[in-house]
Image (cartoon, helix red, strand yellow):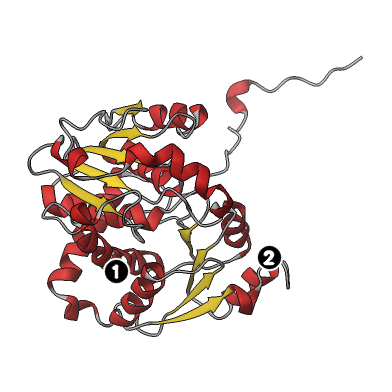
Amino acid sequence: MATKSKKSSSSKKAAKRPAAPKKPKGPFAEKDLLSLRNLAAEDMTQLFKLTDAMKKAPERFINTLRGKTLGLLFQKPSSRTRVSFEVGMAQLGGQAIYLSDAEIQMGVREPIRDVARTLTGYFDGIVVRTHAHANAEELAKHASVPIINGLSDTEHPCQILSDFYTIYSRYGKLKGINVTYIGDSNNVLISMLYGAAAAGVNLSVVTPRGYEPSEELMKDIKVLSKDSGAKFQLSNSPFASLKNAHVIYTDVWVSMGQERQKEQRLRDFQSFQVNQTIVSKALPDALVMHCLPAHRGEEITDEVIEGPRSIVFEQAHNKMHVQKALLSYMLGRKRK
Protein backbone atom coordinates (compact mmCIF):
# COMPACT_ATOMS: atom_id res chain seq x y z
CA MET A 1 0.00 0.00 0.00
CA ALA A 2 1.40 3.30 -1.09
CA THR A 3 1.95 5.85 1.62
CA LYS A 4 2.20 9.61 1.35
CA SER A 5 5.67 10.90 1.88
CA LYS A 6 6.08 13.21 4.85
CA LYS A 7 7.16 16.74 4.14
CA SER A 8 10.29 17.80 5.90
CA SER A 9 9.84 20.18 8.79
CA SER A 10 12.02 22.71 6.99
CA SER A 11 9.53 22.92 4.14
CA LYS A 12 6.69 23.78 6.44
CA LYS A 13 5.79 27.38 6.78
CA ALA A 14 5.98 28.64 10.32
CA ALA A 15 2.56 29.28 11.70
CA LYS A 16 1.93 32.97 12.09
CA ARG A 17 1.15 34.02 15.60
CA PRO A 18 -1.40 36.72 16.04
CA ALA A 19 0.23 40.03 16.79
CA ALA A 20 0.05 41.05 20.43
CA PRO A 21 -2.22 44.00 21.00
CA LYS A 22 -0.32 47.24 21.14
CA LYS A 23 -0.08 48.72 24.59
CA PRO A 24 -1.37 52.29 24.69
CA LYS A 25 1.42 54.84 24.84
CA GLY A 26 1.72 57.97 26.92
CA PRO A 27 0.62 58.93 30.42
CA PHE A 28 -2.80 57.60 31.45
CA ALA A 29 -3.22 56.04 28.03
CA GLU A 30 -5.63 53.37 29.22
CA LYS A 31 -9.25 54.23 28.45
CA ASP A 32 -10.35 54.48 32.08
CA LEU A 33 -8.99 55.49 35.47
CA LEU A 34 -10.82 53.40 38.05
CA SER A 35 -7.92 52.50 40.34
CA LEU A 36 -4.29 53.36 41.03
CA ARG A 37 -3.34 49.71 41.28
CA ASN A 38 -1.64 49.64 37.88
CA LEU A 39 -0.30 53.18 38.07
CA ALA A 40 3.21 53.71 36.70
CA ALA A 41 5.60 56.10 38.42
CA GLU A 42 6.29 57.70 35.04
CA ASP A 43 2.58 58.47 34.64
CA MET A 44 2.69 60.49 37.84
CA THR A 45 5.89 62.26 36.81
CA GLN A 46 4.41 63.37 33.50
CA LEU A 47 1.10 64.31 35.12
CA PHE A 48 2.84 66.50 37.69
CA LYS A 49 5.00 68.21 35.04
CA LEU A 50 1.89 69.11 33.07
CA THR A 51 0.16 70.24 36.28
CA ASP A 52 3.08 72.57 37.00
CA ALA A 53 2.83 74.05 33.52
CA MET A 54 -0.93 74.55 33.83
CA LYS A 55 -0.59 76.27 37.19
CA LYS A 56 2.20 78.54 35.93
CA ALA A 57 0.54 79.62 32.68
CA PRO A 58 -3.15 78.57 32.60
CA GLU A 59 -3.83 80.84 29.62
CA ARG A 60 -1.75 78.53 27.42
CA PHE A 61 -4.29 75.72 27.88
CA ILE A 62 -7.63 77.50 27.48
CA ASN A 63 -8.42 75.64 24.26
CA THR A 64 -7.06 72.24 25.26
CA LEU A 65 -10.51 70.64 25.52
CA ARG A 66 -12.48 73.09 23.43
CA GLY A 67 -15.72 71.50 22.28
CA LYS A 68 -15.39 68.60 24.75
CA THR A 69 -18.09 67.77 27.29
CA LEU A 70 -17.61 65.96 30.60
CA GLY A 71 -20.41 64.22 32.45
CA LEU A 72 -20.39 64.20 36.25
CA LEU A 73 -22.48 61.22 37.29
CA PHE A 74 -22.68 61.44 41.08
CA GLN A 75 -24.53 59.02 43.32
CA LYS A 76 -22.81 60.55 46.35
CA PRO A 77 -22.83 64.26 47.24
CA SER A 78 -19.68 66.30 46.72
CA SER A 79 -18.31 69.81 46.87
CA ARG A 80 -14.55 69.70 46.07
CA THR A 81 -14.72 66.89 43.51
CA ARG A 82 -17.64 68.42 41.66
CA VAL A 83 -16.39 72.00 41.67
CA SER A 84 -12.79 71.11 40.80
CA PHE A 85 -13.88 69.10 37.75
CA GLU A 86 -16.45 71.69 36.63
CA VAL A 87 -14.12 74.68 36.95
CA GLY A 88 -11.17 72.74 35.59
CA MET A 89 -13.12 71.70 32.52
CA ALA A 90 -14.22 75.31 31.94
CA GLN A 91 -10.63 76.54 32.21
CA LEU A 92 -9.65 74.06 29.49
CA GLY A 93 -12.36 75.37 27.16
CA GLY A 94 -14.78 72.51 27.66
CA GLN A 95 -18.03 72.05 29.54
CA ALA A 96 -19.15 69.84 32.42
CA ILE A 97 -22.70 68.72 33.13
CA TYR A 98 -23.69 67.50 36.60
CA LEU A 99 -26.12 64.59 36.90
CA SER A 100 -27.29 63.70 40.41
CA ASP A 101 -28.50 60.27 41.45
CA ALA A 102 -32.05 61.62 41.70
CA GLU A 103 -31.95 62.35 37.98
CA ILE A 104 -30.29 59.17 36.71
CA GLN A 105 -30.95 56.52 39.40
CA MET A 106 -28.27 54.38 37.82
CA GLY A 107 -29.04 50.69 38.30
CA VAL A 108 -32.55 51.41 39.57
CA ARG A 109 -34.41 53.35 36.92
CA GLU A 110 -32.44 51.58 34.20
CA PRO A 111 -29.49 49.17 34.04
CA ILE A 112 -25.99 50.60 34.29
CA ARG A 113 -25.12 49.23 30.86
CA ASP A 114 -27.98 51.25 29.34
CA VAL A 115 -26.86 54.38 31.14
CA ALA A 116 -23.33 53.86 29.82
CA ARG A 117 -24.42 53.37 26.22
CA THR A 118 -26.73 56.38 26.32
CA LEU A 119 -24.33 58.83 27.95
CA THR A 120 -21.51 57.73 25.64
CA GLY A 121 -23.38 59.46 22.83
CA TYR A 122 -23.41 62.78 24.71
CA PHE A 123 -20.12 63.00 26.56
CA ASP A 124 -16.41 62.77 25.75
CA GLY A 125 -15.73 61.43 29.25
CA ILE A 126 -17.56 60.66 32.48
CA VAL A 127 -16.57 61.10 36.12
CA VAL A 128 -18.53 58.71 38.32
CA ARG A 129 -18.91 59.08 42.08
CA THR A 130 -20.60 55.97 43.36
CA HIS A 131 -21.02 53.51 46.21
CA ALA A 132 -19.97 50.06 45.02
CA HIS A 133 -16.76 50.01 42.98
CA ALA A 134 -18.46 47.43 40.74
CA ASN A 135 -20.76 50.22 39.50
CA ALA A 136 -17.80 52.13 38.10
CA GLU A 137 -16.41 48.95 36.54
CA GLU A 138 -19.76 48.13 34.94
CA LEU A 139 -20.06 51.66 33.57
CA ALA A 140 -16.56 51.47 32.10
CA LYS A 141 -17.26 48.07 30.55
CA HIS A 142 -20.12 49.37 28.44
CA ALA A 143 -18.95 52.95 27.78
CA SER A 144 -16.77 53.81 24.81
CA VAL A 145 -15.52 57.04 26.40
CA PRO A 146 -13.11 57.36 29.35
CA ILE A 147 -14.57 56.71 32.81
CA ILE A 148 -12.83 58.36 35.76
CA ASN A 149 -13.46 57.19 39.30
CA GLY A 150 -14.34 60.33 41.30
CA LEU A 151 -14.84 58.13 44.39
CA SER A 152 -16.12 54.68 45.18
CA ASP A 153 -16.35 52.78 48.43
CA THR A 154 -13.12 51.03 47.46
CA GLU A 155 -10.90 53.74 45.98
CA HIS A 156 -10.41 57.49 45.55
CA PRO A 157 -7.69 57.75 42.88
CA CYS A 158 -8.08 61.43 41.92
CA GLN A 159 -7.74 62.44 45.56
CA ILE A 160 -4.42 60.66 45.95
CA LEU A 161 -3.05 62.01 42.67
CA SER A 162 -3.69 65.55 43.91
CA ASP A 163 -2.34 64.70 47.38
CA PHE A 164 0.88 63.27 45.97
CA TYR A 165 1.25 66.27 43.70
CA THR A 166 0.98 68.51 46.76
CA ILE A 167 3.75 66.52 48.48
CA TYR A 168 5.82 66.56 45.29
CA SER A 169 5.43 70.33 44.91
CA ARG A 170 6.62 70.86 48.50
CA TYR A 171 9.54 68.41 48.59
CA GLY A 172 10.48 68.22 44.91
CA LYS A 173 10.19 64.43 44.95
CA LEU A 174 8.08 61.50 46.14
CA LYS A 175 10.56 58.64 46.35
CA GLY A 176 11.82 58.28 49.90
CA ILE A 177 9.26 60.63 51.45
CA ASN A 178 7.87 59.28 54.73
CA VAL A 179 4.10 59.58 55.17
CA THR A 180 2.31 58.57 58.36
CA TYR A 181 -1.39 57.96 57.81
CA ILE A 182 -3.43 58.00 61.02
CA GLY A 183 -7.02 56.84 60.71
CA ASP A 184 -9.40 54.38 59.11
CA SER A 185 -8.52 51.93 56.33
CA ASN A 186 -10.92 53.54 53.90
CA ASN A 187 -10.95 54.24 50.17
CA VAL A 188 -8.46 57.09 50.53
CA LEU A 189 -5.93 54.83 52.24
CA ILE A 190 -6.35 52.05 49.67
CA SER A 191 -5.58 54.44 46.81
CA MET A 192 -2.71 55.89 48.85
CA LEU A 193 -1.20 52.44 49.30
CA TYR A 194 -1.29 51.84 45.55
CA GLY A 195 0.10 55.28 44.79
CA ALA A 196 2.90 54.88 47.33
CA ALA A 197 3.81 51.47 45.90
CA ALA A 198 4.26 53.04 42.48
CA ALA A 199 6.02 56.22 43.56
CA GLY A 200 8.38 54.86 46.21
CA VAL A 201 6.71 56.68 49.08
CA ASN A 202 7.30 55.07 52.49
CA LEU A 203 3.90 54.75 54.11
CA SER A 204 3.18 53.99 57.76
CA VAL A 205 -0.43 53.13 58.53
CA VAL A 206 -1.53 53.81 62.10
CA THR A 207 -5.02 52.61 62.96
CA PRO A 208 -6.92 51.02 65.87
CA ARG A 209 -6.84 47.26 66.19
CA GLY A 210 -9.45 45.73 63.92
CA TYR A 211 -9.33 48.58 61.40
CA GLU A 212 -6.14 47.60 59.58
CA PRO A 213 -5.94 47.09 55.81
CA SER A 214 -6.64 43.49 54.82
CA GLU A 215 -3.79 40.98 54.66
CA GLU A 216 -4.67 40.31 51.02
CA LEU A 217 -4.29 44.00 50.16
CA MET A 218 -0.95 44.30 51.95
CA LYS A 219 0.39 41.20 50.15
CA ASP A 220 -0.60 42.82 46.86
CA ILE A 221 1.09 46.07 47.87
CA LYS A 222 4.29 44.22 48.75
CA VAL A 223 4.44 42.74 45.25
CA LEU A 224 3.60 46.05 43.55
CA SER A 225 6.29 47.96 45.46
CA LYS A 226 9.24 45.74 44.48
CA ASP A 227 10.43 48.07 41.72
CA SER A 228 9.98 51.33 43.63
CA GLY A 229 11.44 50.14 46.92
CA ALA A 230 8.61 51.70 48.94
CA LYS A 231 8.44 50.55 52.55
CA PHE A 232 5.24 49.92 54.46
CA GLN A 233 4.54 49.60 58.16
CA LEU A 234 1.38 48.89 60.15
CA SER A 235 0.87 49.90 63.78
CA ASN A 236 -1.88 50.24 66.38
CA SER A 237 0.03 52.89 68.35
CA PRO A 238 -0.93 56.54 67.68
CA PHE A 239 2.69 57.62 68.23
CA ALA A 240 4.25 55.06 65.93
CA SER A 241 6.29 56.12 62.89
CA LEU A 242 6.20 59.83 63.68
CA LYS A 243 9.89 60.46 64.38
CA ASN A 244 10.90 60.60 60.70
CA ALA A 245 7.56 61.59 59.19
CA HIS A 246 7.64 64.27 56.49
CA VAL A 247 3.83 64.19 56.24
CA ILE A 248 1.07 63.36 58.71
CA TYR A 249 -2.17 62.51 56.93
CA THR A 250 -5.61 61.89 58.38
CA ASP A 251 -9.21 61.49 57.26
CA VAL A 252 -12.65 61.22 58.84
CA TRP A 253 -13.35 58.31 61.15
CA VAL A 254 -16.92 57.88 59.89
CA SER A 255 -17.27 57.85 56.10
CA MET A 256 -20.47 58.19 54.10
CA GLY A 257 -22.58 55.07 54.63
CA GLN A 258 -21.07 54.30 58.04
CA GLU A 259 -23.33 56.55 60.09
CA ARG A 260 -24.76 53.62 62.07
CA GLN A 261 -21.27 52.80 63.28
CA LYS A 262 -20.55 56.34 64.43
CA GLU A 263 -20.67 55.88 68.21
CA GLN A 264 -18.49 52.76 68.11
CA ARG A 265 -16.00 54.35 65.75
CA LEU A 266 -15.69 57.50 67.84
CA ARG A 267 -14.82 55.34 70.85
CA ASP A 268 -12.34 53.20 68.93
CA PHE A 269 -10.54 56.12 67.32
CA GLN A 270 -10.56 58.65 70.17
CA SER A 271 -6.84 58.24 70.93
CA PHE A 272 -5.91 58.59 67.24
CA GLN A 273 -6.72 62.28 66.91
CA VAL A 274 -4.13 64.37 65.07
CA ASN A 275 -3.47 67.06 67.65
CA GLN A 276 -0.51 69.21 68.61
CA THR A 277 1.02 66.43 70.71
CA ILE A 278 1.02 64.09 67.70
CA VAL A 279 2.42 66.75 65.35
CA SER A 280 5.21 67.64 67.76
CA LYS A 281 6.59 64.10 67.52
CA ALA A 282 7.23 64.37 63.77
CA LEU A 283 10.06 66.15 61.96
CA PRO A 284 10.23 69.90 62.69
CA ASP A 285 9.08 70.77 59.17
CA ALA A 286 6.54 67.94 58.83
CA LEU A 287 3.35 68.86 56.96
CA VAL A 288 -0.23 67.99 57.91
CA MET A 289 -2.75 66.87 55.30
CA HIS A 290 -6.46 66.03 55.30
CA CYS A 291 -8.57 65.33 52.21
CA LEU A 292 -11.61 67.16 53.67
CA PRO A 293 -14.33 67.52 54.76
CA ALA A 294 -12.85 67.53 58.26
CA HIS A 295 -14.74 66.83 61.46
CA ARG A 296 -12.86 69.30 63.60
CA GLY A 297 -12.50 68.11 67.15
CA GLU A 298 -12.68 64.45 66.09
CA GLU A 299 -9.85 63.22 63.83
CA ILE A 300 -8.07 66.59 63.82
CA THR A 301 -8.06 69.67 66.05
CA ASP A 302 -8.66 73.28 65.06
CA GLU A 303 -5.19 74.12 66.35
CA VAL A 304 -3.58 71.75 63.88
CA ILE A 305 -5.75 72.35 60.83
CA GLU A 306 -5.29 76.11 61.22
CA GLY A 307 -1.65 75.78 62.25
CA PRO A 308 1.52 76.64 60.32
CA ARG A 309 2.19 73.05 59.27
CA SER A 310 -1.23 72.51 57.72
CA ILE A 311 -1.39 72.44 53.92
CA VAL A 312 -4.98 71.19 53.89
CA PHE A 313 -6.37 73.96 51.71
CA GLU A 314 -3.39 73.99 49.37
CA GLN A 315 -4.10 70.30 48.99
CA ALA A 316 -7.75 71.00 48.15
CA HIS A 317 -6.89 73.69 45.59
CA ASN A 318 -4.36 71.45 43.85
CA LYS A 319 -7.15 69.00 43.12
CA MET A 320 -8.41 71.19 40.29
CA HIS A 321 -4.96 71.65 38.74
CA VAL A 322 -4.12 67.94 38.79
CA GLN A 323 -7.53 67.01 37.37
CA LYS A 324 -7.07 69.53 34.56
CA ALA A 325 -3.87 67.73 33.58
CA LEU A 326 -5.58 64.35 33.92
CA LEU A 327 -8.52 65.44 31.77
CA SER A 328 -6.20 66.80 29.09
CA TYR A 329 -4.52 63.40 28.81
CA MET A 330 -7.65 61.28 28.96
CA LEU A 331 -10.06 63.38 26.93
CA GLY A 332 -7.61 65.20 24.69
CA ARG A 333 -6.16 62.28 22.79
CA LYS A 334 -7.76 60.78 19.73
CA ARG A 335 -9.30 57.39 20.32
CA LYS A 336 -10.36 54.76 17.84
> Label 2 neighbourhood size at 10 Å, few (<14), some (14-19), many (20+)?
some
Disc 1 residue type (three-letter): Met
- Report x, y in % for residue 247: 20, 43
Residue at image mark 1: 320
Circle 2 — which element? Answer: helix
Residue farthest to the top?
Answer: 1
Q: Give whichever of 64, 297 is nearer the camera.
A: 297
Residue at image mark 2: 113
Residue 227 image-quadrant placement: top left
Examine the rendered structure and indicate whether residue 77 appears above or below residue 230: below
Disc 2 residue type (three-letter): Arg
Look at the numbered discs 1 and 2 and tell me whether their residues touch, using CB distance below 8 Å: no
Q: Residue at x 51, y 65 (%)?
A: 128
Examine the rendered structure and indicate whether residue 92 appears above or below residue 54: below
Q: In this rendering, would 109 be left or right of 2? A: left
Circle 1 — which element? Answer: helix
Q: In this rendering, would 30 be left or right of 246? A: right
Q: CA distance from mark 1 to mark 2?
A: 29 Å
Examine the rendered structure and indicate whether residue 173 appears above or below residue 69: above
Residue 181 image-quadrant placement: top left
Residue 240 visible in the shown view: yes
